[in-house]
Image (cartoon, rainbow, N blue to C red):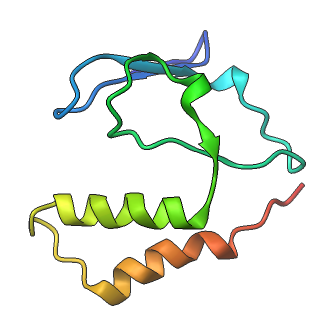
C-alpha cells in the first residue's frame, strides 16, 4: 500500500506475511548518492529504511536469479534473458 501523504510504502509477501514499510522521504535521489538495494523477500519486518544496503550488480544478479527460480516454471525465462535483465542495470546512468 502506498501512503502518498506520508510518502511511505507498506507491503508484505505471501512467504513473509509480517508487514514491512519504508519511507520514501528518507532516500536521497540525487546523482551524487550511491544507489541502494533491499531484497523484498527478506525476513525483516517493520521499518526497513536502515536495511537498505549499497547496491552491487552481483547482489542484484543473485536476487534476480532467485526470483526467476522461484517462479517454479510458471514463467519460462531462459538463461540468456535472465542474464540480459541482470546486465541491464549496468547501462543505467543518472541524468542529473
At 50% from the left and 41% from the top, the residue drawn is: 38
Q: Is the residue 71 above or below the residue 6 in the image?
A: below
The image shows residue 68, relative to residue 51, as above or below, that is below
Q: Quadrant of the N terminus?
A: top left
Q: Is residue 39 left or right of residue 4?
A: left
Residue at the (32%, 16%) spot, across then down: 19
Choose top left, top right, bottom left or bottom right for residue 68.
bottom left
Q: Residue shown at 85%/43% (left/top)?
A: 30
Q: Residue at 25% across / 84% down in the picture?
A: 78
Q: Residue furthest top?
A: 6
Is 12 positioned to the left or the right of 63 in the image?
left
Q: Where's residue 46, x and y in %?
A: 42, 14
The number of numbered discs placed on residues in the rendered structure image is 0
Whole-percent x, y for residue 91 in the image: 68, 76
With 44 as the anchor, is 56 left or right in this view? right
Q: Quadrant of residue 41?
A: top left
The vertical placement of 69 against 32, above or below, is below
Instruction: State the residue lying farthest toward the left.
Output: 73
- Residue 95 in the image: state x and y as whole percent: 85, 60
Foreground of the two, 3 or 90: 90
| Front one among 8 and 80 | 80
Please say if 41 is above or below 51. below
Quadrant of the image for the C terminus? Answer: bottom right
Amino acid at each position: 500500500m502506498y501512503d502518498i501523504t506520508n510518502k511511505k510504502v507498506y507491503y508484505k509477501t505471501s512467504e513473509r506475511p509480517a508487514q514491512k514499510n519504508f519511507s520514501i522521504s528518507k532516500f536521497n535521489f540525487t546523482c551524487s548518492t550511491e544507489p541502494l538495494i533491499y531484497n523484498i523477500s527478506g525476513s525483516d519486518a517493520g521499518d526497513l529504511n536502515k536495511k537498505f544496503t549499497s547496491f552491487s550488480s552481483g547482489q542484484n544478479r543473485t536476487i534476480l536469479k532467485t526470483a526467476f527460480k522461484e517462479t517454479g516454471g510458471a514463467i519460462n525465462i531462459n538463461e540468456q534473458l535472465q542474464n540480459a535483465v541482470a546486465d541491464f542495470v549496468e547501462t543505467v546512468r543518472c541524468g542529473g
